Amino acid sequence: MNIYWHTSLAFTSGLAEFFQALSKYEFLQNAVWAGLLVSVAGGVVGTYVVVRRIIFMAGSIAHCVLGGIGAALYLRRAHGWEWLDPIYGAVAVALLAAVIIGWVSMKAKQREDTVIGAMWAIGMAAGILFISQTPGYAEDLISYLFGSILMVTKADLWIIAVLDAVVVLLGLLFYKQFLAVCFDEEFARTRGIRVEFYYMLLLILTALTVVLLVRVVGVILVIALLTLPVAVAGQFARRLWQMMILAALLTVLFTSSGLALSYGPGLRAGPTIIMLSGAVYLLVIIASSLRRRFSKIKP
């Protein structure tokens, strides 16, 4: 009982400390805004990723992002390219990886798994090598692997907002086409929909969304934030657009709550966000399983 009481007291005081700091410190306000912005793209594109079953493609793209970040950091610090923000390198490499994976998936399906695995490993290796040769603070690698949402600046927010707007606009503008491609490619072809074009566009939107989410939870954890809110939303929603809205709201809840929970004890925000998301997912799955079991034995 005492343990429960002390835990509850520490939890409450930690949240109170976070909300007090939120009103005073700009870096916390920026972090909350970043979480809100990426949640919209995550909810929309994450739903497509889960329904189309391209989670491992998204994972490969995410790990390639580290290569782009590492190259940009190396050129910026070792060669004086001050204008080169790491997010530019991340976007460039993510788009390149999406195009390569998409082309292989459409033209040579038997080699798809090999290419996905190879790019996954090569992207990580290249990023680590670039960062290890980059002058400066060694914390950079950990920040990009596990997220650095508390380091988001006003300039970063504008970049995130632009990418977010592009992703959400295209994701909603071609909703019907993506819906057809995700559920029934053959039917989509009979309706005159250019399946290959929209499939490639979906991978490109996935790449941009991955870049957004990497800033929040890092390269290693990005797939969890892209899929767990959608998995929870899928337990309650019956239509794709409902899943998108609910997944976006859940992502907002997870990122904001994860930030608040991590602030007091000084934990990393990214892993805390994922632990919270995973805990909610497991609880929902267990509750759903118990409900089905009791409904079967109910007279």
Image (spheres, rainbow, N blue to C red):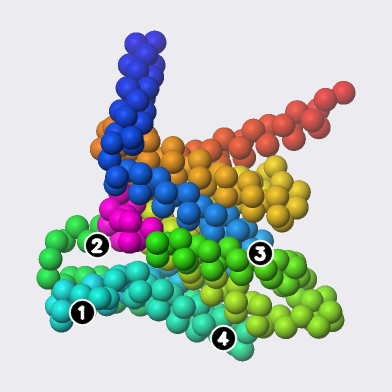
Instruction: Identify the disc placed on residue 141.
Output: 2
Q: Earlier in the sequence, mark 4 or mark 3?
A: 4
* Separation of residues labelled 4 and 3 (CA atoms): 24 Å
Instruction: Report the predominant secondary structure element of the magenta stretch.
Output: helix
Residue 214, image quadrant: bottom left
Q: Position of residue 105 (x, y in %)?
A: 59, 81
Tell me the kind of residue under disc 2. Answer: Leu
Q: Earlier in the sequence, mark 3 or mark 2?
A: 2
Instruction: Check residue 150 for magenta coloring.
Output: yes
Between 13 and 108, the one lying in front of the other is 13
Q: Residue at point 60% right, 66% down?
A: 169
* Separation of residues labelled 1 and 2 (CA atoms): 19 Å
Residue to which mark 1 is pinned = 81
Q: Earlier in the sequence, mark 4 or mark 2?
A: 4
Q: Earlier in the sequence, mark 1 or mark 3?
A: 1
Between 163 and 226, the one lying in front of the other is 163
Q: Position of residue 86 (x, y in %)?
A: 30, 70
Residue to which mark 3 is pinned = 172
